[in-house]
Image (tube, rainbow, N blue to C red):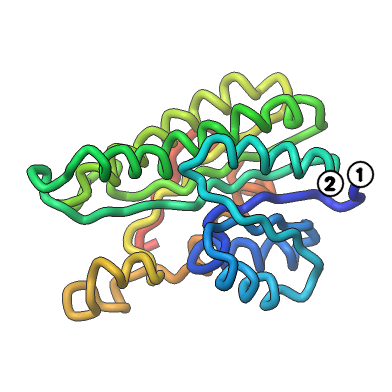
């Protein structure tokens, strides 16, 4: 069993996931960086000075989700923090949103996080304290046109957060949903150019990572089980 606390961050190869991984590593966590693509994942790990664990993971695949939790249990012996950050955000009108797109959105944004939480739950219960942070979106309150599948699938983690906080209270398992507005990430720029959405209107990944870190550290325990809305004005 590793001596330092362990944090699993999905979607860790760029954007919010990478910023969160770097911050948690600086704070003394052994970070398990999980993402789909080996190249960007290796580059992300190389950018972090402290030792990390790298894990290729397609969050849409429940078998892979369960296998990763088992690996963490076997190799590290503990999991103190789970940051469900990986996301899939198709931008399509409703009448152009086909079954495959809907399924992929729900698998990445809802089913995968649920599988990771459920499979890690026995490990969380056995420890003195654990924390789950689900990265949601401001779109679950006010969905941008075209985010029919994305916003609705992300809304699932808001309710998961409440469930985890209620059921986890007796085991000191805390849970938060962090719901930012537009964040300057590769995923955002694959959907919107800077003319449509200027950088000045966007949060930085580091700003969101700071909120995630505050949830984990206990600074925001008064919001345990809640959705924390994060906008540029904040």
Q: Pointer 2: what residue?
A: 76
In the picture, measured across the screen, residue 168 lies left or right of residue 198, that is right
Quarter holding residue 168 = top right
Residue lying furthest left:
95
Give the CA separation, mark 1 to mark 2: 5 Å
SS state under label 2: loop
Other-residue count near label 1 (Cα within 10 Å), few / some / many at <14 / 14–19 / ≥20: few
Question: Measured along the vertical axis of the image, is residue 94 above or below residue 111?
Answer: below
- Is residue 210 something that shows in the picture? no
Q: Pointer 1: what residue?
A: 1
For the point 77% across and 57% down, the residue is 29
Marks 1 and 2 in Cβ contact (< 8 Å): yes
For the point 23% across and 70% down, the residue is 192
In the picture, measured across the screen, residue 138 lies left or right of residue 227, that is left
**Observer-nearest of 225 and 219:** 225
Q: Quadrant of the N terminus?
A: top right
SS state under label 1: loop
For the point 31% across and 78% down, the residue is 199
Q: Quadrant of the C terminus?
A: bottom left
- Is residue 50 something that shows in the picture? yes
If you read the primary sequence from the N terminus, does the residue marked by circle 1 or circle 2 appear first? 1
> In the rendering, at what x and y percent does residue 194 appear?
24, 79
């Amino acid at each position: 069993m590793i001596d330092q606390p362990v944090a699993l961050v999905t979607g860790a190869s760029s954007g919010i996931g990478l910023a969160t991984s770097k911050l948690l590593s600086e704070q003394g966590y052994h970070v398990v960086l999980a993402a789909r693509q080996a190249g960007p994942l290796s580059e992300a790990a190389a950018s972090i000075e402290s030792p990390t664990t790298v894990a290729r993971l397609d969050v849409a695949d429940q078998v892979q989700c369960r296998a990763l939790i088992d690996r963490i249990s076997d190799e590290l012996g503990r999991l103190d923090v789970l940051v469900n950050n990986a996301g899939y955000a198709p931008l399509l009108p409703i009448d152009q949103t086909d079954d495959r797109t809907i399924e992929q959105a729900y698998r990445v944004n809802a089913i995968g996080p649920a599988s990771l939480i459920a499979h890690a739950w026995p490990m969380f219960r056995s420890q003195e304290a654990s924390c789950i942070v689900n990265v949601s979106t401001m779109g679950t309150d006010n969905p941008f046109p075209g985010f029919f599948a994305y916003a609705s699938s992300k809304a699932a983690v808001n309710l998961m957060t409440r469930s985890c906080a209620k059921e986890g209270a007796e085991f000191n398992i805390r849970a938060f949903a962090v719901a930012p507005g537009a964040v300057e990430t590769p995923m955002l720029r694959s959907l919107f150019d800077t003319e449509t959405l200027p950088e000045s209107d966007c949060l930085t990944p580091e700003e969101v990572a700071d909120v995630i870190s505050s949830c984990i550290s206990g600074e925001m325990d008064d919001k345990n089980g809640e959705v924390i809305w994060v906008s540029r004005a904040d």
